[in-house]
Image (cartoon, rainbow, N blue to C red):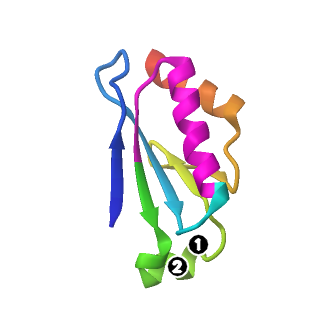
Amino acid sequence: MGDRDDGTEDAEGSAVDVTVYTREDCQLCEEAIEAIRQVAVDVGVGVAIDEIDVDEDEELEAEYGDRVPYVLVDGQPAYKYRVDTFDLRRRLRDRTTN
């Protein structure tokens, strides 16, 4: 269902799991994924991005509809439509200190 994009490992030895609910030809989705990758590089933390196309699953399509991208960080809802890069920096830094 999803495409896994494993990043480099963080100081703890494991990447931060990030799930992005997307759909085909979604410019905001592409921007969100790029923002996540760039912040991870800037902070020096690995991320494992799992892209899930909501159009491939009727239940996900009903749940998310056009409300994509929808981003989870470590399984917790984090962003809808746009990634708050300042908040993501904080989350990734906090993850490496815990």
Q: Give the farthest residue toward the front.
A: 25
* Distance Cα–Cα, label 1 vs label 2: 5 Å
Q: Is residue 64 depicted above or below 30 in this figure? A: below
- Whether the magenta-drawn stretch holds residue 39 is answered as yes
Location of residue 19 in the rendering, given as x and y in whole percent from the top left corner: 46, 51
The kind of secondary structure the magenta stretch mainly shows is helix
- Indicate the position of residue 8 as horizontal and vertical percent values: 34, 26
Could you tell me which residue is drawn at 41 percent across and 79 percent down? 57
Badge 1 element: helix
> What's under tag 2, amino acid-wise?
Glu
| Quadrant in the rendering for residue 45 | top left
**Disc assigned to residue 25:** none
> What residue type is disc 1 on?
Tyr
At x 58%, y 52%, the residue is: 30
Evaluate if marks 1 and 2 touch, with contact meaning CB atoms under 8 Å apart: yes
Where the N terminus falls, by quadrant? bottom left
User: Percent from the top left, x then y, of residue 71?
Assistant: 56, 52
What segment is highlighted magenta in the picture?
29-49
At 53% from the left and 68% from the top, the residue drawn is 23
Q: Name the residue under label 1.
A: 64
If the image is split into quadrants, where does the C terminus sit?
A: top left
Q: Which of 51 and 73 is in front in this view?
A: 51
Q: Residue furthest left?
A: 13
**Residue 58 horizontal/vertical position (percent):** 45, 84
Residue named by callout 2:
61
- CA neighbours of label 1 inside 10 A, class few (<14), some (14 to 19), many (20+): some
